[in-house]
Amino acid sequence: MRAVRLEAVGSIKLREVDKPVPGPDELLVRIEACGVCGTDRHLFHGEFPCRPPVTPGHEFSGIIEAVGNAVSGFAVGDRVTGDPNIACGRCPYCHAGRVNLCRNLSAIGIHRDGGFADYVVLPQKQAFVLPADLPPTHGAFCEPLGCCLHGVDLAEIKPGSSVIVLGGGVIGLLTVQLARLAGATTIILSTRQASRRALAEELGATATVDPTVADVIDAIAGPAGLAPGGADVVFECAGVRETVEQSMRLARAGGTVVIVGVTPQGMKAEFEPFDLLFRELKVVGSFLNPYTHRRAAELIASGAIEIERLISRQVPLEEAAEVIANPPAPGEVKVLVVPSRLSSLATLATGETVDDNLSSR
Ligand code: NAP
Ligand code: ZN
């Protein structure tokens, strides 16, 4: 089979490798789509620890082609999405239900071979069935959506809450949609690219801000701003110092700041402890997708999350290495690697049906 191999930091190539054989508890999954994420680019540049050679790709879904002899509840032909983050189940954090903090956490696509290939091996405990009639590319969004769900869970959004999202990449745009579903009535997104601001407004943002032309604090939380005094919840989804610092100033007194964006290790940001105390701000980190993958799969299966408009490009395996080795193109939200041309054509066909369904709601 073909696999995109990260052979060393800075070296990634499409190779012919042996088709993997699933163990007793594992599924062999033919990949239908695998999303390219910032982490894949960090692996390529050596900014995230991993031990090459490895096949990256942790946002994947596909069709079961074979099952190990101890597998139950899954059948050949089922469409599944994989939760790539594997907790050990034995450490104190796992025993406390904090599986994303597992001391022995490993990930498919980082520590073992992932989805930029024709096939991936998926432990059955990491697999979740998706509907047969779902567009084949949508399952690739379960992992990023699961991470956003964890952030939204931590934020405890209530009907009528006001929400600010900083950063309009796929994480910010999924968070906007989840905030809307959770009942937020004011949802303000700040991001630099105009196309993303327009898309956010179509996906549920009630207002957007261009941080390059406006003072974000004044435009949102100032006396004449979009949410005077700040919002109940602020999601930092850009991972840069500027937005981390803005996030705490944009939350209202008693509000919650959720840090979702991954800043470079060692980066420092400034805040005033007095302000945190005086305004009783709650600042929480949101890391990965503990126990949210099934709900993410259910949300995607239900059609409640707009996925089609987040897909900027579908590329074959032959182009994956180049996409990973280069920064995202302006305007791009999510690039999917689609190993088989057949499934990409199927997506186009089913995608139209989904759009029709959405517009007739
Ligand atoms: P992304 O596409 O890079 O999105 C971040 C976006 O933030 C940028 O594309 C940029 O869009 C915007 N931005 C940059 N500077 C800004 C500023 N000063 N003000 C407002 N917006 C700004 O990445 P993503 O896939 O959406 O992921 C977002 C972050 O979440 C990343 O740091 C990623 O590593 C992290 N992440 C975390 C988890 C977790 O479990 N916590 C999971 C997945 C990803 P514009 O060009 O439009 O400004
Ligand atoms: Zn553990």
Image (cartoon, rainbow, N blue to C red):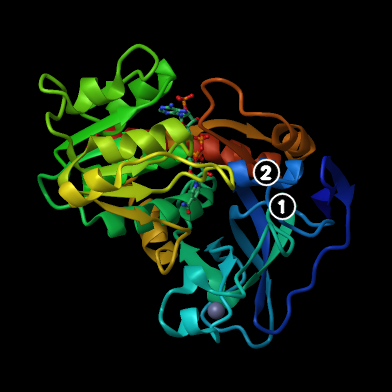
Horizontal relation, residue 223 to residue 2: left or right? left
Q: Is residue 285 visible?
A: yes
Amino acid type, label 1: Pro
Q: Kindly identify the residue that appears in the image at 50 percent across and 42 percent down.
A: 268
In the drawing, what numbered circle is on residue 47? Answer: none
150 vs 44: above or below: below
Q: Are marks 2 and 1 in contact (CB under 8 Å)?
A: no
Q: Earlier in the sequence, mark 2 or mark 1?
A: 2
255 vs 156: above or below: above
Residue 158: give x, y in percent of width and height. 14, 52
Q: Is mark 2 within 8 Å of ligand 1?
A: yes
Q: Residues within 10 Å of mark 1 (few under 14, many from 20)?
A: many
Residue 71: give x, y in percent of width and height. 61, 83
Q: Kindly identify the residue that appears in the image at 70 percent across and 44 percent down.
A: 340
Q: Nearer the viewer, residue 38 or 304?
A: 38
Amino acid type, label 2: His
Q: Which residue is mark 2?
A: 42
